[in-house]
Image (cartoon, rainbow, N blue to C red):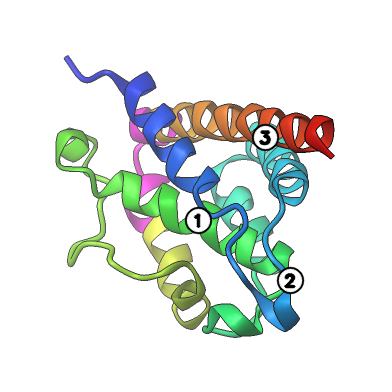
Amino acid sequence: MINLDKHAAETSQAILDYIDEPVKEGSTLQAKDLEKLATDALGVLQEQGVYAFFLYLLSKSGKEDQQDKLTPEEFGACAIMARLLNLLNNPELKSLDSAFANGWDKSPPELNSCKKDILKHISDRIAIDLKRLLLVKSLFEQTLIYTRYGAKALTSSTTEVS
């Protein structure tokens, strides 16, 4: 039996690890920015589904494929997508049959060079099977919930220290 909650928590932590990463013009990805983006993306996922969720994040990810050319919001969108796509390639989740054929080893900014491939993968591999689609949606929702609250906790702790 696969512990999906464990995978959601680990993936959330991997997303949260991008907080304070440097981006465009000396800025960094802030916990409050990641919290807002995760909250908004979660709303799209819950209301409109997996494909719309990726469309939303891809619309927020900008067009650059280098981290130092992305705004915090663009980098945050890329980071969320990269970690979630990487989650689908986890060997333990092989039974989902939703992994990229050649694996997924791209850095977050590199997503912007393969937007069409990502959307095609979602429609051809995930959305094609209702059971798989609902499982992936549930897994992504849990991951985003953990990310949102993790970022909120990190925002609160940095606010209290200031």
Q: Amino acid at mark 1?
A: Met
What count of labels does the image hold? 3
Residue under label 1? 81
Quarter occupied by residue 94: top left
Mark in the foreground, 3 or 1: 3
Q: Which mark is residue 58?
A: none
Mark in the foreground, 2 or 1: 2
Spatial CA distance of label 3 from label 1 is 21 Å
Where disc 1 sits, the SS reads: helix
Residue 132 in the magenta stretch? The answer is yes
Is 67 left or right of 106, judged from the image as shown?
A: right
User: Considering the image in quadrants, where does the N terminus appear?
Assistant: top left
Residue at coordinates 58% horizontally, 63% vertically from top-left? 21
Spatial CA distance of label 3 from label 2 is 18 Å
Name the spot of residue 108 as percent of width and height, x first: 47, 67
Q: Amino acid at mark 3?
A: Leu
Residue at coordinates 52% horizontally, 58% vertically from top-left? 79
Q: Which mark is residue 154?
A: 3
Q: Which mark is residue 27?
A: 2
Q: Is residue 96 above or below residue 74?
A: above
Chief SS of the magenta region: helix
What stretch of residues is rendered in magenta?
Answer: 124-134
Mark 2 vs 1, N-terminal side: 2
